[in-house]
Amino acid sequence: MSSLSSPLTLPSGLVLPNRLSKAAMAEDLAESGAHPGTALNTVYNKWATGNWGMLLTGNVMVDSSHRGSPSDVALPSSIATSSPSAPSDRATALALWTAWANAIQSNGTPAVMQVNHPGRQCPRNLRKGAALAPSAIPLQLGTGLFARFISWVVFGSPREMSKDDIQHVVAEFAETARLASDAGFKGVELHAAHGYLLAQFLSERSNQRTDEYGGSAVNRARLLREVVAAVRSAVPKEFAVGIKLNSVDFQAKSGLSDVLAQIGSIVDAGGVDFLEISGGTYENPEMAGPEYSDKPSESEKSALKQSPTTQLPVSSRTAAREAFFIDFARDVRAAYPSLPLMVTGGFRTRAGMAAALESNACDIVGVGRPACVTPELPREIVFNEGVGDEKAVLPMKEVRVPWVAQMLVRWVGKGVGAGIMTKAYQDSIKALVKAA
């Protein structure tokens, strides 16, 4: 039986000092040239003091010419293309990434970089030409005419990737992992969830190819397997490689069998240290949680007015939403019992996190939004013996959704609500930087 405070040794040999990981979040703090800088170093220095078992970064895009947002950290395009400026660009990136890794690991917590490619979720203003995708299927934020128009304006129509395109992306993932390793990071997590490129290949809704990268569930996982293999060949054996995978795409029994087959093909190929289970896409953003709101109840509001740092009691609402994706994790555990699993999404209490571990549903618990409110929450709450279970509730913030935005959710899609939640917590991260 595992406890939150027990260490975990991953297959690569990387030891996590405990089972609590700060999950990847969109920090929105990259500086000129899509590089990390003072702001990211400052906020990760703060998280580093919290006694986390692992600190996952937000998205680092594998190509600066294909980003999901303007403030994503990214590998300079010149490096993967071996342009004349590549050596100097790599030296600059290496110095800045090394400073970032040192900030994250200033108190010994392992730093793992989340690496990603947006595919068709790359907005028009962040790229030249059409977005890349497994098939030329546009992103749709909603089903109505207005939603379709907004989708076209923001994202346009992607083009189907050629096999040369695919191999170039594989090389970009490998080079990003190599640079992360050289900079001192202890691992990378390949983002194959939330509707980004690797997830687009995995899903039959966005991948309708008829070549070896499409068709069957196992074929749709070919790109991810090739990325894992290329990353493994680019980094030392003790460097950890994780994967973040969707669950909500596979809620039907047929979908579940497909994703278990995909996971099996990846596990059998070897090289994976952990699998993080999350879910959702821009089209259906389940990763934002039920109703995309962390608005406290009236009793919780009253407690917060009396003391902004009050640890709120566990409500039935909190209990019901805890661990959005735990059932899917149990299915994966049953099929692949030796694969280390991380579940992120909805954990709000120490008791809920401990129960997930003790039931063997997962090995690592990922926490996102509460880490923005209380960056040192493992030390201050979860591992603080002075805080009883009844008060060991992870603090959230109230996010007010303007009526205009509520209307946009109806007209455009649920992604608007998720975007508001993301922006609210990005503001919390920036507040941590200012307060430092």
Image (spheres, rainbow, N blue to C red):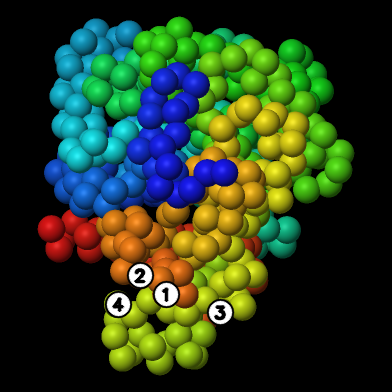
Q: Nearer the viewer, mark 4 or mark 1?
A: 1
Residue 426 locus on image (x, y percent): 34, 58
Q: CA distance from mark 3 to mark 4?
A: 17 Å
Element marked by disc 4: loop
Do the numbered discs 2 and 4 sit on residues whose CB atoms are within 8 Å?
Answer: no
Residue 245 placement, left or right of 30: right
Pointer 2 residue: 387
Q: CA distance from mark 2 to mark 3?
A: 17 Å
Quadrant including the C terminus: bottom left
Q: Amino acid at mark 2?
A: Val
Pointer 1 residue: 391
Q: Amino acid at mark 3?
A: Ser
Circle 2 packing at 10 Å, graded few (<14), some (14-19), many (20+), is: some
Q: CA distance from mark 2 to mark 4?
A: 13 Å
Point 64% across, 20% down: residue: 267
Do the numbered discs 2 and 1 sit on residues whose CB atoms are within 8 Å?
Answer: yes
Which label's residue is closer to the chain start, 3 or 4? Answer: 4
Pointer 4 residue: 309
In the foreground, 397 or 381? 381
Which label's residue is closer to the chain start, 2 or 4? Answer: 4
Q: CA distance from mark 2 to mark 1?
A: 6 Å
Residue 47 placement, left or right of 286: left
Element marked by disc 1: helix
- Please tell me the numbered disc located at residue 347: none
Pointer 3 residue: 315
Q: Amino acid at mark 4?
A: Thr
